[in-house]
Image (cartoon, rainbow, N blue to C red):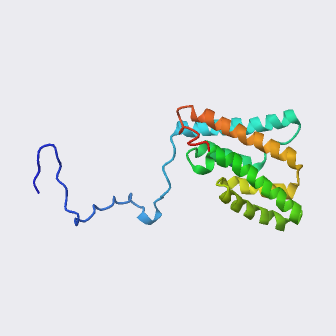
Amino acid sequence: MSKTPGTTATAPSDAPAPAAAAPPPGRTARFRSKAPARPPAPAIAVATTAGVAGLVLLVAIGKLLAMPVLIPPLAASAALVLAAPALPLAQPRNVIGGQLVSALVGFAALAVGGGSLWTAAAAGGLAIGAMGVTRTPHSPAAATSVIVVLTQPPAVRFLALLALATVVLVLVGILAGRSGRTPRYPTYWW
């Protein structure tokens, strides 16, 4: 191989690939984690602080309205928005749309099948399909459809509070994303 100034020589394409780095002493490659690296400490601190603030804000709004606003799936939504803001599941379209679509599926299932565990299970599965069809997948939202069937809340009030809660979480995510310590949020709106 010849080498001209300013260029580097390259190996022929049939050359063997370099060997992988050896595992640390005492550990085999089989037990090494393939999980992504831990986020930097400042990103974890921002996500944690914003998560606490956002969920406490939902409780405060609920106290002001004398109605519960914080439901368990919203904590999971907050985790996606704040700890994994670049994921498609965490984008506003998915958080707000997925939660509302799943709640509507829950109310439809409740109307057809009543408030049984069987209906709740069917609602959770149907919510997955409905989110797929509407291009709003948001995994915590499947649990919202189950909660609707099992608790049988008043539909209009529940949907309004759910919309308010998801918008609040998105706004908290936007503020956290402007901290400079976490990835910018959202990646896209619609």
Q: Closest to the observer: 52 or 161?
A: 161
Query: Residue 170 occupies which quadrant of the picture?
Result: top right
Answer whether residue 80 is visible to the viewer in this image: yes
Residue 5 point in image, percent of width and height: 12, 44
Q: Which residue is drawn at 23% across and 63% down?
A: 13
Q: Quadrant of the C terminus?
A: top right
So how many labels did they put on this image?
0
Q: Is residue 28 visible?
A: no
| Relative side of 149 to 84, left or right | right
Left or right relative to 177: residue 16: left
Left/right placement of residue 56 relative to residue 17 reads right
Which residue appears at 69% of the width and 40% of the height?
169
Residue at horizontal 78 percent and vertical 44 percent from the top: 162
Residue 141 appears left or right of 115: left
Q: Give x and y (percent) for residue 189.
A: 61, 42
Judging depth in this view, the residue of 132 and 84 nearest the camera is 132
* Quadrant, the N terminus: bottom left
Query: Where 77 falls versus 106 (above or below)?
Result: above
Residue 10 sits in quarter: bottom left
Q: Where is residue 62 in the image (x, y as percent from the top left)?
A: 83, 38
Q: Where is residue 155 in the image (x, y as percent from the top left)?
A: 87, 49
